[in-house]
Image (cartoon, coloured by chain):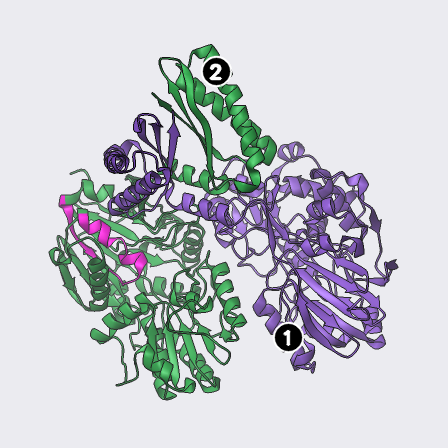
Chain colours: A green, B purple
Amino acid sequence: MADEGKLQLIPLGGLGEIGKNMTAVKYGNNILVIDAGLTFPEDELLGIDVVIPDITYLLENKKLIKGIVLTHGHEDHIGALPYVLKDLNVPVYGTRLTLGLLRQKLKESTISADKIKLNCIKPRDTIKVGTFKVDFFRVSHSIADAVGIAVHTPIGTIVHSGDFKFDQTPVDGDVTDFAKLSELGENGVLVLMSDSTNVERPGYTMSERNVGNTFDEIFRQAKERIVVASFASNIPRIQQVITTAHNYKRKVAIVGRSMLNVVSVASELGYLDVPDGTIVELDEINRLPKQNTVIISTGSQGEPMSALTRMARSEHKGVEIMSGDTVVISATPIPGNEKMVARTVDQLFKLGADVIHEAVSGIHVSGHASQEELKLMLNLVKPKFFVPVHGEYRMLVKHSNLAQDLGIPSENIFVGENGLILEFSKKRGRIAGRVASGRVLVDGLGVGDVGNIVLRDRKQLSQDGILIVVLTLDKNKGAVVAGPDIVSRGFVYVRESEELLEEAKERVSQALEKCCSKNNAADWSAIKYSVRDTLGKFLFEKTHRRPMILPIIMEV
Amino acid sequence: MADEGKLQLIPLGGLGEIGKNMTAVKYGNNILVIDAGLTFPEDELLGIDVVIPDITYLLENKKLIKGIVLTHGHEDHIGALPYVLKDLNVPVYGTRLTLGLLRQKLKESTISADKIKLNCIKPRDTIKVGTFKVDFFRVSHSIADAVGIAVHTPIGTIVHSGDFKFDQTPVDGDVTDFAKLSELGENGVLVLMSDSTNVERPGYTMSERNVGNTFDEIFRQAKERIVVASFASNIPRIQQVITTAHNYKRKVAIVGRSMLNVVSVASELGYLDVPDGTIVELDEINRLPKQNTVIISTGSQGEPMSALTRMARSEHKGVEIMSGDTVVISATPIPGNEKMVARTVDQLFKLGADVIHEAVSGIHVSGHASQEELKLMLNLVKPKFFVPVHGEYRMLVKHSNLAQDLGIPSENIFVGENGLILEFSKKRGRIAGRVASGRVLVDGLGVGDVGNIVLRDRKQLSQDGILIVVLTLDKNKGAVVAGPDIVSRGFVYVRESEELLEEAKERVSQALEKCCSKNNAADWSAIKYSVRDTLGKFLFEKTHRRPMILPIIMEV
């Protein structure tokens, strides 16, 4: 083969975006896939549930794929697997918690989980996947059991940082494996792929332990019930709430589907240390004196259907927020969610709660490395080539600048794009082409069946609604025998706009008369054009709106 | 009258929200209105252009309204006037720039500007409006010519801060009028209404002058063309760009409709000091050596149609962004706009520009007072009663807490809501009732004709599209003589889903047969129900989507 002896890195997701991380590593006839994540849709993807990477390239090279290795259990790293594994049944490798969370996802999907080969690995394990020798090393992150990956190939070693920070005092004691990174660096690393999420933040990311100190202070001062909302997947955070609750002799109830799921998986697998009797049912919490209670909830992003949002709207069945409650939102709004979070905070304030959120420092820390940590990673691993990953385009550029500051020559740094083939020999790296890549939209059970035309229609429908003009033609008489009728949705209040719609009908009738006398009702497309044109102009003149106009002709 | 001798403050907008500020002050048979702003729609208000306050209360008391006084020319303070003045032709009072910007707005509206009585006032002017004596005093803000207002009534004095900060070194030299505020405080103030926007920020807001220093540094280092995007209304900011450009011997071009408008109004009225020949046409800029050019542009919020966004997409006719360009985004994203701004920054990076944005400190400062300044306002004015305004609910609560820290008793503080009547005597304040209030949605030329049903329909249409089922009945035969036909928009790609739609049609036909044989095709609503029900269940089962299903029956 032409590329034998060459190593290719092909990012299929996660470059130029935060989300749907996925990278293929190819050497000879072997492909190893790192992660398979999803992303949540931008606002303009109307009606779309989730977005996954386009895996055309992998499907075309199905036989070469030796396995998928996972860095950790966040949605943007494992969320696409229920879709990907349908078409691509290959062995999956991950840590215990990562696989536990994956199993849960597969159970909820239409895939039959038994058929998937899930292989549990531990940090410092070395496994063989196809021709590749793969090492796993511990990294600190905002979920337990996260790892980075080293892939050894005949050409050299690739290190993928995974999502990481250098937390010196992580709650679970899982410090990023400095020794392994140093060893890899000493032995020589060809390419480093490293997390760019926080490259815009100077200094160091604070330790997860800081949040524990803040919790301690809040719990000490709170006189009545405490509600803490956080990401369900942030197990170290949940651990700290439980530990602090126990210290202050409070019982804990868990609410929200994903929080219940994660707590159940994490407890079962031993990733949560819950003192006996600390976690109780919500019913019991509601019977206890308020000062003895804590509720851990989903909804830190103000998600419309989440538990905290429903509490804020007084629509939660089990929890009624009231004066005296302290609500802690232990998270930062993800870009795009700011307004939803602010609304939830406002509603909680209106119910009389004391809300501790964003503005308070120490209530949340990021799971990603800031600038000084990113430099440390580069200095430990000392790669010949550098590929910043996991970031929007500007972040990749800034990460590249940072690497150049440390002395990596710019020609050895590749600010990539999804789909680019980055090809490396021992001495050189180059862009060797491009494979199919992009986003696949998932809407309900449909994967990829919603595209630009459907989205464009949804957009137009969402802005000004639709007017449907129906009429029945008698093909023998060449005349309109029923209609035209106009039905509208999402355009105006029909009751208050009767006059407008009557006039619209009148205009359509006039247009039809002209049209039919000329064309003898034969030319449907002329009729449709005439209806659309007449009505469009009339309605814009009267309302300055442009609803979709849909003429439907029937024939008897 | 029952309320004679009583003073009422009735907020009609701006409480529990940032936007559409409007307050009525009523004493006896006199009403004075302060500001009449708009707000931009939340995402869920699909298709809505702007939102204005419900002024039912004012229309019901039309004869009592003596005038509208304006604090400054921002959209959230004057933007509703083109709508309000249609139904409420009363004298308007404002500073020169505020009225200049208002005139521009009225020109673009359907109102005939000549009929409106615009009265120009200056800071330290005292005017008589009905029974009220009204003082205006200078405040610093992110627009020139901003004022606060003191309304003297027989019961006592009300002070409205307007939007303000205590900038000690404002660019236009317009320091907030400490002396007037002190004088008012010394003479006794009954009620203070004060801006709550930045109550969550500790300390002091930085001076506008800081941005000038940052500009100086950027201009000194930039080797080629500089593009600065900011709010069009931020005249002090534009002034600083022009001054810095002049210092570095660069010519300036203005792009973007609102930027051109504001610069033209502000220059004409003398609010911009433009050295001769500094501002030139874009054509000329494009012919000059790049190091001698600056472009001032709209688009600091990533607005889809704005000049900077079009440049970022390489769709701007006059400006092509390229490597060597320095783009400065001198603004903070307004909550909700973060993603759009980030996308614009990314696209500019891809075109090779160096982009200086949010992350860089000193590139933008707020126009609103932080905590220490809010305290200073309270200490200068020393009001008996305090009403925090201009803020979301949590901000009003926090502003109330801050006032309590300064010794104002909580019973003298009113965290209000739009529509509440706050009634004051010399000694007491109380909530005396409620008037109609809320939001009026403007969509094209329609004001208030889009309501919940239309929005609900737009929402459903935007998520899963629409399926229209048409059929023609022969009323004599009692049978379907044409159709059923199914037309869909925004649901699935029709070409790829032919089978699904065929099967759907089949199901509808079956349902119709049952229905018609039973009901003799007489009961249209039974037919419609049956179609909706059959099709809804079938489609959900097949796709997990819930499009709007619209059966239309015609009769021949």
Q: Which residue is mark 1?
A: B400
Quadrant showing the C terminus of chain A: top left
Check disc 2 and report the residue beneath it. A515
The amino acid pointed to by label 1 is: Ser
**Residue in the foreground of this view, choosing between B501 and A270:** B501
Give the left or right position of residue A502, taking residue A154 as reference.
Answer: right
Q: Check residue B156 for magenta coloring.
A: no
Residue placed at 43% from the left, 74% from the top? Answer: A320
The front one of B33 and A372 is: B33
Image coords of residue B197 (percent x, y): 63, 64
- Verify whether residue A71 appears in magenta: yes
| Kind of element beneath mark 2 | helix
Residue occupying image coordinates x 32% and y 65%? A380
Residue B266 seen anywhere in this rendered image of the structure: no
Crowding at mark 1 (Cα within 10 Å: few <14, some 14-19, many 20+): many
The residue range painted magenta reads A63-86
- Direction from residue A91 to residue B10 in the image, left or right: right
